[in-house]
Amino acid sequence: MKKNLFWWVSITIVLCGIFSAHEFDGRYGRSINGDGKAYYAYLPAIFIYQDPTFSFIDEVELKYYPTDKSQFKDFRNKQKNGKYVNKTFPGLSILYAPFFFLSMLVAWVGGFAVDGYSAPFQWGIAFSHVVYFFIGLRFLLSVFRRLKIRDAVSYFVFIGLTFGTNSWYYLVYDHTVSHIHNFFLATVFMWMLLNWIQTKRLQYLGWSGIILSLLIITRPTNGLMLMFLPLLTMLSGRQLKDLITKEYFQIKRLIPYLIIGLIIFSIPFLLWKWQSDLWLVYSYNEEGFNFKKPHFFDFLYSYQKGWLVYSPLLFLSIVVSGFCFSKKSLFQLVGFMLPLVLIVYVLSSWWCWTYGAGFGQRPMIDFLPFIAIGAALFLNEFKRINFAYFIVLPFCILSMIQSYQITNSILSGGTTTKEQYWSHFLQLKRDAPSVVVSENWKLIDQKALNLVQKIDKSHPFSQSIKSRELKSVKIVVLTIEIACNDRKPDLRLVLGNQDGTLYKDVYLGDFISGSATQMEFKIELPNLKNQILSYYVWNGDTSTEAEITAMRLQCYN
């Protein structure tokens, strides 16, 4: 593939994916979300609010995010002295910073709120993923060239990395984590190390130490990347013992770089002091590693969240890499496989080995540049690689479809079973939710409304269904038949009572489609007594338009 064609086509496809997946000025679908709220919060806390307590997030949540708090993220963890700290490390905020300051300028010039969360800031964080990812690929191209890998092979590998792994999901759909930015740092780190090994220029070693400091304060497990140093050394025709000679290592000339690296490394400690008056804290509180009980094989192969199940192209890559390195020497094979096994062991020992929802094992994205080397070297042995496109492109299509499935709740990231995986294989339409009524439930009231209703900007509420006065109710089943053509409809079912002490809502945006669809939802309640329940549909006072053809309220005890 020609180099210009790869860059233009890939960046265009990624940008189209982002535009189609996000609503940057709506309450749902914002880029600054989930754990990303925590990683990002250092910037507005320091440069806009001067607030070490992060108390501003409560107002931000009310202004920009769903009022039902379905996307609320409280990242403030209490310490022993009673004060709170941001649970995440600040390295990602450093990488966000250029886009944050540019967004401040755009917001100020464009008349948007300069509060850190208006539309320009949401766009800025989304675009930071695109910029860092493709700059990372450019550094990886330089690495491959130093290893004498042909550009045609490099661009082929880049297609697999971009579209055939879970990096596509975190590049396009989910901007709440640090892994795309870690991918960029990993490529820069590898490029610096390789330049140092091959040229003996100490400035490259110094800069690799600075990048490593930034990698660690972004995600401490990134320090495991150092384990690939022996492999890079062998691929450069050097030996590890060479790297400790005066020709490669002179401490006096490295002092300026050490100082910069230590300054970067000290940033978390300074921020902990700013937030809590403590120099050293464990900000994750009770979350941690259990190295005695790793979920090693679940991490790799489970349908729940298996890395190689959801990125099978990487399984193929590891196989051909192992074959390639074993042909060269046993030491190269060990230099590739041993770090990989240890990385999986460490990451699978985390208390939440699935790393929440999402697509596949996201922390492995950080190490993709190192994993890609073996596949590139293997393909470089072939004069022509056109045959490989017929193998890789189906994996790319599969990865993109499954990313869509996870995003649209066709598959459930982190909880998918084997049966669900195969029964929904390549399915592009989500299942309508339904409720199985237990024999133990006692139906005490049922009301239905079978008429066509329109919801729009002028009429944001549907007609309501009211129960009779109930002596006691524990479970309510809400049924609706509704159609909506909006891409991200802000529609919800609302259940309340007569005196206003009960308010429960269910967001419909994950399930609704253009054609009329019947859906059922179960809501469990405290044992309410002497209540009249009311059920209606609301579009959140937005311009969302929908057509309701049937509603039903069932109350059980």
Image (cartoon, rainbow, N blue to C red):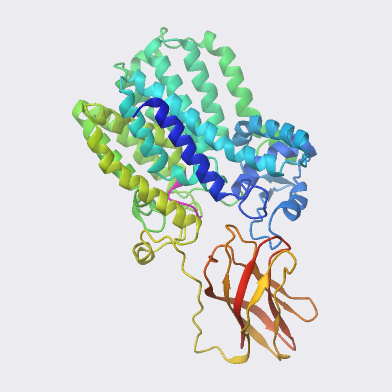
Q: Which residues are magenta?
A: 357-362
* Residue 359 magenta: yes
* Residue 263 shows up from this direction: yes
Where does residue 213 sit, x and y in percent of width and height? 55, 27
Q: Identify which residue, 344 or 398, lies in the foreground.
A: 398
Q: Is residue 335 left or right of residue 69?
A: left
Where does residue 273 sit, x and y in percent of width and height? 72, 36
Residue at x 51% of width, y 54% of height: 356
- Above or below for 340 versus 463: above
Q: Identify which residue, 119 or 138, lies in the foreground.
A: 119
- Above or below for 159 versus 70: above
Quadrant containing the C terminus is bottom right
Residue at x 50% of width, y 85% of height: 438
Chief SS of the magenta region: loop
* Residue 236 magenta: no
Where does residue 226 sit, x and y in percent of width and height? 43, 28
Q: Is residue 439 left or right of residue 46?
A: left
